[in-house]
Amino acid sequence: MRITNALIDSRHPGSVVKPEYLSHGTLECYSVTTSRRFYEEFLGLECVRHGKRSMAIRCGMAFHIVCLHVGNRLRPCSVDNHWGIDVASAEEVDRIWKAAGELKDTYGIHTITQPVDQHGTYSFYIEDLDHNWWEIQFYDGIQHEDMFDFGDRFTDADLPDAFK
């Protein structure tokens, strides 16, 4: 079966790769068994164990995350390297933030930031038991569509000097 509802027309017809859709990303975990509980029970994601040391995680769309069991070879991420999950309202963000604080020990959550309005969303971040970061956010619209519909808003000339 061929996925057709996720296909895009490339804006770069001269590119070497002729992509049809972005299919997956990868994150690391200490244990797929322990992490699966957090992904399903807390984040509400669908999980399937498709390999001896890996599972796929998804939440709609034609995109999934491969969770790879690496044990003590895990390399922690920073908050700048995070996965975003959209929810239905700002009140839902607040409800989940409260639940995260109450369930921190149950799911091995390391860090929970305060909810804030930033970059057009209302959100907070969670650092999970595997040092992966998740942004729980409300955006009034569909950020995925708007991000690309708005197009480029900055150039390299707009970078702060510290990043040049």
Image (cartoon, helix red, strand yellow):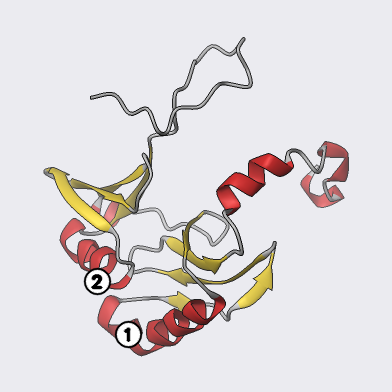
Residue 145, above or below 2: below
| In this rendering, position of residue 117 left or right of residue 154 | left
Q: Residue at x 58, y 81 (%)?
A: 114
Residue closer to the observer: 9 or 94: 9
Q: Residue at x 44, y 87 (%)?
A: 98
Residue closer to the observer: 98 or 126: 98
Question: What type is the residue that disc 2 sits on?
Answer: Glu
Q: Which mark is residue 103?
A: 1
Residue closer to the observer: 11 or 104: 11
Q: Residue at x 38, y 85 (%)?
A: 99
Callout 2: SS: helix
| In this rendering, position of residue 87 left or right of residue 102 | right
Residue 97, above or below 133: below
Mark 2 vs 1, N-terminal side: 2
The x, y position of residue 94, in whole percent, is 51, 83
Question: What type is the residue that disc 1 sits on?
Answer: Leu
Callout 1: SS: helix
The x, y position of residue 148, in whole percent, is 65, 40
Residue 21, above or below 52: above
Instruction: Mark 2 vs mark 1: give the one in front.
Output: 2
Q: Which mark is residue 22?
A: none
| Quadrant where the N terminus is found in the figure | top left
Q: Which residue is mark 2?
A: 41
The x, y position of residue 102, in whole percent, is 36, 90
| In this rendering, position of residue 151 left or right of residue 133 | right
| In this rendering, position of residue 90 left or right of residue 35 | right
The x, y position of residue 68, in whole percent, is 26, 47
